[in-house]
Image: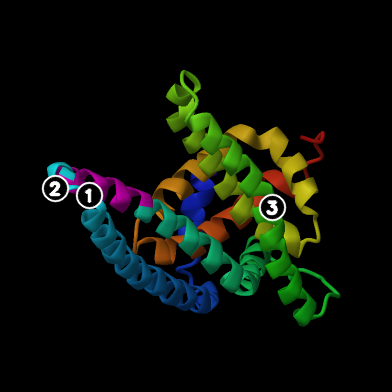
Amino acid sequence: MNGLGCFAQGLGLILKPGLRQYVMIPFLINVVVLSFFIVYGIAQYDQWMAYIAGSLPDWASFLSWIIGVLGLLVGFAILLYGFLIVGNIIAAPFNAILSVKVEEYLLGRPLTSNTPFTLVVLRSVSREFIKLAYYLPRLLGLLILSIIPVFNALAPFLWLAFGAWMMTIQFADYAADNNEISFSELRRRMASNKFDGLLFGIIAYVLVAIPLLNLILIPAAVAGGTVFWVEHLAEVQAEAV
């Protein structure tokens, strides 16, 4: 099963009667977090635009609409990434439980673990910060590359590849963590599945960026990432990246 198929199967899995109940809490968390970011973003955007309009001289007032459009695009990007980061941190323990139940459904047997639930919660949240530490330096490097002449012509393609890769890591990591596989080991295993990883990540990157629809597609991506783990990563041994 390729990466696209894994995502599609994940969407089907969260609709099954035995798994739907594990989607509700992550869904509600996403609703609350997204609502907060939308309300806060609208309030800040209006204040920022009022400040910009008041700072422009009369002869440059025609630039305000251009700045408004750019501000809207930048604000949407910040809102999306902020929603994903905060939502994933808060919902991490519940996404981990969803991933466990999906993997058990796929394997037809329960996962064995001696880890107390409280430690599972702490581990899943701390894992999100480990991923942030991995993402942010690479994100900064890509931002710098995007403003360098000549190289910035490649920026749109690099952003798409980077976003897709990060999505695959994000959503396959829940199953890896549940199986007590370290984040570095997950990356080593993904090195031998780069093409399928990008296929999964691209569909997740595009669909999760759609407001409101992403409320249900994030749990679908968690389930799909678990399918990807079972199909491509569970038994892989690869060289370090």
Looking at the rendered structure, which numbered label has been put on residue 133? 3
Name which of mark 1 and mark 3 comes first in the sequence. 1
Could you tell me which residue is drawn at 49 percent across and 67 percent down? 14
* Quadrant holding the N terminus: top right
Name which of mark 3 and mark 2 comes first in the sequence. 2
Which class describes the residues within 10 Å of circle 3: few (<14), some (14-19), or many (20+)? few
Location of residue 193 in the rendering, given as x and y in whole percent from the top left corner: 66, 36
Q: Name the residue under label 2.
A: 58
For the residues marked 1 and 3, what is the alpha-carbon distance in whole angstroms? 39 Å
Labels 2 & 1 near each other (Cβ < 8 A): yes
Location of residue 2 in the rendering, given as x and y in whole percent from the top left corner: 55, 40
* Residue 130 vertical position relative to residue 194 in the rendered view, above or below: below
Could you tell me which residue is drawn at 42 percent across and 66 percent down? 216
Outermost residue to the right? 114
Question: Viewed as shown, does residue 127 lie left or right of 45?
Answer: right
Q: Picture quarter containing residue 217?
A: bottom left
Report the span colored magenta. Answer: 61-74
Q: Nearer the viewer, residue 160 or 22?
A: 160
Q: Name the residue under label 1.
A: 56
Could you tell me which residue is drawn at 69 percent across and 52 percent down? 133
For the residues marked 2 and 1, what is the alpha-carbon distance in whole angstroms? 6 Å
Instruction: Look at the image and say whether residue 67 sits in the magenta stretch.
Output: yes
For the residues marked 3 and 2, what is the alpha-carbon distance in whole angstroms? 45 Å
